[in-house]
Image (cartoon, rainbow, N blue to C red):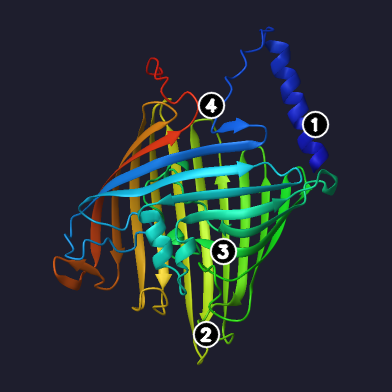
Amino acid sequence: MKSTCFLTSAMFTAMVMAQTPATPPPDPAPAPPATSFTYKGFSASGYVDSFYNQNFNDPASRYSQLQALNITANKLSLSSVTGSFAYDPAPVGFRVDVGYGRTYDSFFLSEPVHTDWSRYLLNAYVTLKPKSWKGLQFDFGKFVTSAGAEVTESHLNWNYSRSLLFAFGPYYHTGLRVTMPVTSSWTVGGQIVNGWNVVKDNNSAKTMGFTSVNTFKKAAWANTYYAGPENTGTTAGWRNFYDTALTMTPTDRISAYVNLDIGNNKYATGGSGTFWGLAGAARFQLNKWFAIAPRLEYYSDKDGFWTGTPQSFKEFTTTGEFKLNDSMITRLEYRRDWSDQPYFMVGQVPSASKHQTLLVAGVMVVVRPGMFSFGNKPKP
């Protein structure tokens, strides 16, 4: 079968070349903009991220439910001001991301055991990567999770708000992370960590993580599995969590992903909570400075593990992005969340509505070399 496909492709290519006059090769693509300031292995970068989140339910708590990081409602908020500092492992290196804002507040609120000194550290780990180990890398410390199609930094995502899968998944871990390339397109990894969203463990056992990333010409497929006891104060009852994300880039201007999460947490006293969700999103780069990104999700919390109420959610988001240049990014986003149960606060009344509607405006400034070189607006 492989031989047939190869022969067909070769014949098609030969036919096209025979009918098409020779043309000079296109000009090489411009180099991507530098993302950090570097000096002899050291690098530094940073960003500022702010938002206004209008919740049309007008909750008296001024808290928007189901939001992972843009949690405040009806007021201008600082999501994150973050500085990143790293040293390339040769063979020992490090990375530290330190900052302040609602992103760090959200991480702190998600912790079953609070550790005040690490509250403003997003990443803080040491890396060991000797050249003779053929790409094998060890990271020890605090690092963001490997699970999910989205990341913590807003400007690196397609939408401004995070998905339900992000909100109900792990944010970060503390412990040992190992990655190893098997081939040029396949990397695997293992982790031994304190658990979900903790620096100091909430019990006496560890959680294990396993990762696999396959890259193809027009796609990437990532798989992550975490298993271990996550109940506070006891090692009885394990949480199993599987995340898979397939990202596709069929053209330079169109990208899409599909993300699936499946999890179960067994309680120490018996019984368990099962949860799962499916998300799909796309990004259409209409020109160099404007893009549109829709996202659609379904999430089942059928045992009320996350929300305390057995229910299922649906979520639709569409985001418009306007870039002044590679450092100045603005987004305007419409989002609507639904539940099959009265869950959302309206005014001063909790659990008064089955839906909420948000209008979110986000402004992100990424600090990088040449960030003040505006020039002319790029042509479509």
Of the image marks 2 and 4, the number of the one nearer the N terminus: 4
Report the side of 341 relative to 349 (left or right): right
Give the alpha-carbon distance from disc 2 to disc 4, as whole Å: 48 Å
For disc 3, the neighbor class at 10 Å (few under 14, some 14 to 19, many from 20) is many
Q: Are marks 4 and 3 in contact (CB under 8 Å)?
A: no
Residue type at mark 3: give it.
Answer: His
Camera sees residue 68: no
Task: Name the residue rendered at 36%, 51% in the picture.
Answer: 161
Q: Nearer the viewer, mark 2 or mark 4?
A: 2
Could you tell whether 88 is left or right of 100 in the image?
Answer: right
Instruction: Tell me how far mark 4 sits from mark 3, CA to CA.
Output: 31 Å
Which sits earlier in the primary sequence, circle 1 or circle 4?
1
Q: Amino acid at mark 1?
A: Leu
Task: Say what amino acid the circle numbered 2 marks.
Answer: Gly
Q: CA distance from mark 1 to mark 4?
A: 40 Å
Q: Which residue is mark 1?
A: 7
Check whether the beta carbons of the residues at disc 2 and disc 3 lie within 8 A of each other: no
Q: Where does label 3 land, which residue?
A: 173
User: Residue 267, position in %: x, y?
Assistant: 51, 86
- The residue where tag 2 is placed is 233
Residue 30 coordinates in the image, percent (x, y): 57, 19
In the foreground, 32 or 276? 32
Q: Nearer the viewer, residue 47 or 32?
A: 47
Q: Secondary structure at mark 3?
A: strand
Of callouts 2 and 3, the N-terminal one: 3
Residue type marked 4: Pro
Disc number lying in front (1 or 3):
3
